[in-house]
Image: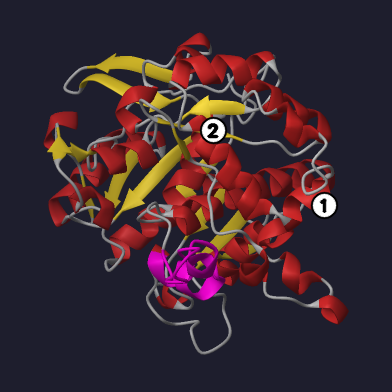
């Protein structure tokens, strides 16, 4: 059992930021109950479904239990109230104020369960002109400086990350914050409200080196004017690799690997600061030299000289790369209806309480009956809830 075994999490979230956060908790042993509206959350309807479940939804919701509750009905609200009384954590990512209008704001939930960890994930925080705006990942990238960080280094044209980075960084931050709040509750017996915005999360994520020019007010500078124009991607005779030399020792190794020992004593590259001042020239020299080698040969030479380097893998290639296979980083599991499913293993490997993938993503309402029975609903009351559609069960779960 994982380190969060025995913890019960109510997941009222949709899309990615909340679902991935609660999935991480589930991988670490928590029981996660995904509360969905009739018809299911939006991510169920995005992408090509397999066995009724799109791949992205699957990878955000594996191992959870699904109950469908119509929170517009009084009966549905009573069911959620019963679930709240038994929960350790509630996570929601409605726009600020929406869940309070539904009758389940933090103050109401706190009276039902004083020790609960209540998590509110928003796009922009609760204040300011954007607080009540709809949000998706690209909007956060636009406001957080991400498009400036990713801008084309030659033309300056803004560009976005081609993944939903803001959602997933928020997920990681939320999972860590929840764990800390649970630890505090274990010591002090107090539940608390965690407020987390995607925008603030991204600024915290970018700040250490991405916002270096803003750190000292007396020495503010535009980082984009200081950085070089070349990425550390180099073309070889048969592909692309990356290689980098930060320390003096690594630079010496680079020069020896490329048979350019005369550059070791070149004053333009003799120190880390000198190499930074002449970054574009240095990278161009390295690029010109690497263009004369086959990838495997030059990677071996770089490795022999202790220079950090690797081939550039496509997503289709990484499954069979020896490093991925050596650590079983991608788990292959066969589930009925899905066939072989590939998932990245939980990244944190606990030696005493190992995290694990506990099951596939649920079908919509797959566990509605099971959850109601566990809450103590008798057959007559359960059937009445289902007949009224205050709660909806997947027919295959009956």
In this picture, which residue range is highlighted in magenta? 138-159
Q: Which residue lies furthest to the right in this view?
A: 218
- At 64% across and 71% down in the image, what residue appears? 225
Q: In the shown orientation, is residue 236 left or right of residue 393? A: right
Secondary structure found at label 2: helix
Please tell me whether residue 140 belongs to the stretch shown in magenta. yes
Q: Where is residue 350 in the image (x, y as percent from the top left)?
A: 66, 20
- At 27% across and 66% down in the image, what residue appears? 73
Which circle marks residue 289 in the picture? 2
Q: Where is residue 190 in the image (x, y as percent from the top left)?
A: 76, 53
Secondary structure found at label 1: helix
Quadrant in which residue 312 is drawn: top left
Q: Badge 1 is on which residue? A: 273
- At 84% across and 77% down in the image, what residue appears? 219
Q: Which of 271 and 44 is in front in this view?
A: 271
Which numbered disc, 1 or 2, marks the residue that appears first in the sequence? 1
Q: Quadrant of the N terminus?
A: top right
**Colour mapping used in the image:** secondary structure
Q: In the shown orientation, is residue 70 left or right of residue 152? A: left
- Image: 45 above or below 226: above
Are there few (<14), some (14-19), or many (20+) residues within 10 Å of tag 2?
Answer: some
Q: Position of residue 182 (x, y in %)?
A: 70, 44
Q: Position of residue 5 (x, y in %)?
A: 59, 27
């Amino acid at each position: 059992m994982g380190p969060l075994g025995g913890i019960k999490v109510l997941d009222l979230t949709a899309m990615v930021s909340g679902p991935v956060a609660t999935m991480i908790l589930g991988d670490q042993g928590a029981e996660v109950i995904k509360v969905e509206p009739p018809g299911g959350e939006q991510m169920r309807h995005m992408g090509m479904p397999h066995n009724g479940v799109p791949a992205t939804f699957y990878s955000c919701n594996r191992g959870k239990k699904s109950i469908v509750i119509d929170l517009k009905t009084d009966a549905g609200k009573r069911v959620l109230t019963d679930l709240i009384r038994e929960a350790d954590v509630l996570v929601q990512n409605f726009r600020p104020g929406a869940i309070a209008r539904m009758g389940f704001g933090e103050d109401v939930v706190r009276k039902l369960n004083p020790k609960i960890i209540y998590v509110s994930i928003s796009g922009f925080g609760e204040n300011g002109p954007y607080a009540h705006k709809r949000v998706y990942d690209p909007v956060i990238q636009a406001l957080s400086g991400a498009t400036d960080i990713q801008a084309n280094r030659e033309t300056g044209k803004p560009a976005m990350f081609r993944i939903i980075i803001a959602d997933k960084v928020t997920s990681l931050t939320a999972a860590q914050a929840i764990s800390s709040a649970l630890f505090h509750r274990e010591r002090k017996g107090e539940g608390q409200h965690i407020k987390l915005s995607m925008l603030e999360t991204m600024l915290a994520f970018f700040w250490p080196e991405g916002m270096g020019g803003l750190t000292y007010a007396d020495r503010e500078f535009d980082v984009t004017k200081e950085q070089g124009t070349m990425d550390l991607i180099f073309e070889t005779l048969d592909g692309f690799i990356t290689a980098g030399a930060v320390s003096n020792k690594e630079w010496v190794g680079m020069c020896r690997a490329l048979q350019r020992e005369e550059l070791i004593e070149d004053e333009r590259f003799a120190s880390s600061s000198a190499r930074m001042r002449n970054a574009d020239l240095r990278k161009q020299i390295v690029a010109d030299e690497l263009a004369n080698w086959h990838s495997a040969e030059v990677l071996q030479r770089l490795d022999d000289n202790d220079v950090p380097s690797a081939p550039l893998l496509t997503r289709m290639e990484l499954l069979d790369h020896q490093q991925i296979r050596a650590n079983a980083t991608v788990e292959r599991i066969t589930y009925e209806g899905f066939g072989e499913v590939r998932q990245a293993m939980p990244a944190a490997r606990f030696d005493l309480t190992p995290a694990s993938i506990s099951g596939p993503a649920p079908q919509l309402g797959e566990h509605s009956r099971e959850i109601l029975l566990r809450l103590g609903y008798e057959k007559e009351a359960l059937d009445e809830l289902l007949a009224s559609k205050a709660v909806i069960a997947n027919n295959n779960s009956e």
